[in-house]
Amino acid sequence: MSVKKLIIKELINSSLEFNAAATDLINEIENMGEDEIIIDFTDVVFISRSFAQAYVSGKIKSFKTVKEVNIPVEVEPMLKMIENNFNQRIKSTN
Amino acid sequence: MVYSLLNDFNKFIKIMRNHDGSNKIDTSTESFLSPTTLIPLLCEINNKKIQYITAHPNTSNYIKDILNKKATNTRTPFIILPYDENERKNKELSHNTALKLNKDYGSFFVLKYIIAELTNNIYDHSSFEEGYSNQGYTYCQEYPNKDLLDICVMDDGLSIPGRFKKSGIEFNDECHAIEKAISNISTKSEDPLERGNGLWSTIKLVVEGNGGSALIVSDRGYLHIKNKENYKYDLLNNNDIFKGTLISLRLKKNQVQNIHELIEIFPGNPYKYKIGRG
């Protein structure tokens, strides 16, 4: 399996605010040749709900394997909250 | 003296109703202009190409500072939101705006959350690209003597009812459209987990989490929330005076606790609109 690492701060910036940016990121991931993408969240200071929703939703729909590393403590609760919401729904429909 | 958010917006309506259509606007009767009065006023001044503002002695320098986008310890610069997508991404708007605010109001995260969600809504729903919106604005003002912080975000675009109409979402009147907008309904996705969560969660953080108040004005309708039990919907007589959507939030000087528990799941909209009035 081929793997690519992306540093999200360099691709977008350290404050992840707009859902359009998340959508663009997912589209970029879809167009990559690699099967697994690792998103490095080093130095990210904020993630908005809108960004997190678009990112997690896009990640779930993607055929790629997308993983996160180095998630800062300021960012983890929002990302986890959104992932839990989607995961709860997947569990209840299975 | 700090009046209610609705009162502040009605001041703007009063000033515009008294405007005679000339290239001068008279605000001299108002010795104090809060963001909720000033931001829609500046929007109208820009749209109608009004060149002169007559101001009360108390507000003259204040208005000049705002127009020159000056910030102080108690207020952010008046920001006109950038059209260009890359410029928007690069500016880290919410983060940089929140850095200038007193974190005792809600918390640093809550301030960023509010500004991010409200500006996201402008870009998502107001459609600069489609030509519906001329401008989006943000401005924040602290009243240190009263321990209050006002955050005002507005655009002169399609409005909530306008956007719903375009997307085929039915509603009875403009207030009903506002009620739907804070009920996890989105024109962008039918999936309630994907979209439609920014506005209700922002209101919840401010009103229930912080004990603050909120005002949403969109097209002719408004919702004014003083607290969870005390709120009012109504229609304004503001044709040709106000276009678009204004959201003003007034925070108290306390930190919101258990933020993520508060906003995790949409619990239902507690602000019910009785069709017809209120």
Image (cartoon, rainbow, N blue to C red):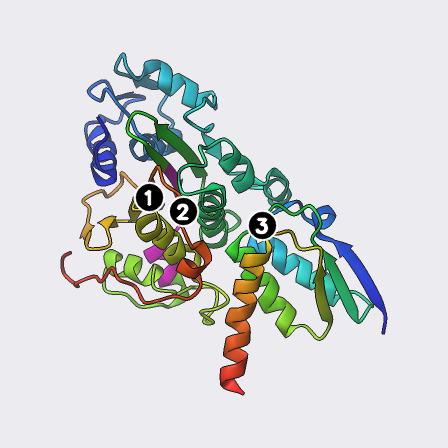
Q: Are marks 3 and 1 in contact (CB under 8 Å)?
A: no
**Type of the residue with mark 1:** Lys
Q: Chain of mark 2?
A: B
Q: Which residue is mark 3?
A: A74
Query: Looking at the picture, does residue B271 appear above or below residue B17?
Result: below
Assess whether residue B161 is covered by the magenta stretch. yes
Q: Residue furthest right?
A: A2
Q: Are marks 2 and 3 in contact (CB under 8 Å)?
A: no
Residue underneath mark 2: B157
Residue under mark 1: which chain is it in? B
Front in this rendered view, residue B36 or B219 = B36
- Where does residue A44 sit, x and y in percent of width and height? 65, 47
Residue at image position (45%, 36%) is B103
Note whether B237 is above or below B61 in the view shown: below
Q: Residues within 10 Å of mark 1 (few under 14, many from 20)?
A: many
Q: What is the secondary structure assignment of the residue under circle 1?
A: loop
**Tag 2 near tag 1, CB within 8 Å:** yes
Image quadrant holding the C terminus of chain B, namely bottom left
Name the residue: 62% across, 72% down: A60
Q: Position of residue B262 (x, y in %)?
A: 40, 59
Q: Position of residue A58 (x, y in %)?
A: 62, 67
The residue located at (44%, 47%) in the rendering is: B114
**What is the magenta range?**
B151-165
**Which of the chains bears the disc numbered 3?**
A
Instruction: Calculate the distance from the C-alpha at mark 3 to the C-alpha at mark 1.
Output: 37 Å
- Between the residue at mark 2 and the residue at mark 1, the CA separation in whole angstroms equals 7 Å
